[in-house]
Amino acid sequence: MVNYNLTNQRLNKQQEMLLEIQKLQFAALDIALFLDTHPNDPVALYRHKMYTERLRQVKDAYEMEFGPMTIMGHEVGDSWRYINGPWPWES
Amino acid sequence: MFIYEKKLQYPVRVSNKDVRMAKAVLTQYGGPDGELSASMNYLTQRFSMPLNELKAILTDIGTEELGHMEMVATLFKKLIKGATKDELIAAGMGGYFADHETCPFLVDAEGEHWDSKFTQAKGDPIADLYNDMAAEQKARATYENLIVLTDDPLVKDTLRWLREREIVHFQRFGEGLRLYEEYSNSKKYF
């Protein structure tokens, strides 16, 4: 995954949680592509289940704190935080 | 359908402004072997694929490529951010600025516009899958050329990651091709 040793940048809480989501989602996606052509592979199935379960937990926590990541996400506050910056190309 | 998720697939970072590099990376946005071409190849070809494995892999890789477009556009915006008039002109981007300011647009590194002729959908699974494997190798080669063009370790990091994805996709398409060959051999319809 991303080599943050290349900079001395300190991540804030939102960036740290986002990085964790990116890591888990990347693992789940890469295994899913493998499953597309190997749909009966038990090890890949197990790993996909593991990563997606953990991903759901981290994503729920992120959305609770920073607002929905998708327009189907759950907004718990009284304002639609989905529109809040920074957008992915700005951060 | 598609739902947007508000995050990049992998972080995009740059150390410094580099207008010349911004112009070069644009080819992976709207060039012949860029991410739009790849995505449109796969998301179109899937409609004529006979096996569920092939429908799935073309859908999912075609979708991932849309995420890569977003990463390349982000890289462009970060590299061009704060460019002066003189820097834009020196990098050969004066004409580009007149038409698009600093918004990423679907052009190659020389400003040639994207064309649907960059994509293929023959309707024949063997022809299309070989095309897709070649497309991944051409994109890999383009990323390697872009890596040569920069000294910025952060830009290299993003480009290396994108290059690696082309190799994984090539592997999956190869497996898809093998699955189709097994399927068509078992049918004996000639």
Image: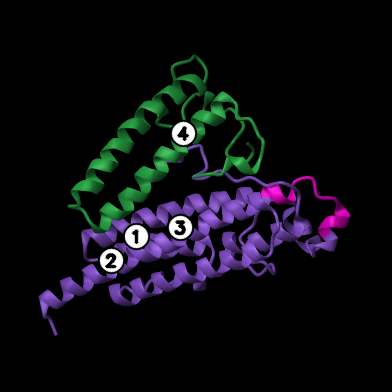
Chain colours: A green, B purple
Question: Looking at the image, is A77 positioned above or below residue B143?
Answer: above
Horizontal and vertical percent for residue A76? 44, 17
**First in sequence: mark 1 vs mark 3:** 1
Secondary structure of the residue carrying numbered label 1: helix
Provide the secondary structure element on which disc 4 rests.
helix
Residue B59 on the magenta segment: no
> Which amino acid type corresponds to the residue marked 4 in the rendered image?
Glu
Report the Cα–Cα distance between label 2 and label 1. Answer: 9 Å
Residue B22: give x, y in percent of width and height. Answer: 70, 57
Distance CA(mark 4)–CA(mark 2):
31 Å
Magenta stretch: dominant secondary structure: helix
Disc on the earlier residue, 3 or 2: 3
**Residue type at tag 1:** Leu
- Viewed as shown, does residue B107 lie left or right of B161? right
Residue B57 position within the rendered picture, expressed as x and y whole percent measured from the top left = 32, 58
The residue singled out by tag 1 in the image is B58
Pointer 4 indicates a residue of which chain? A
Dots 2, 1 in contact, CB < 8 A: yes
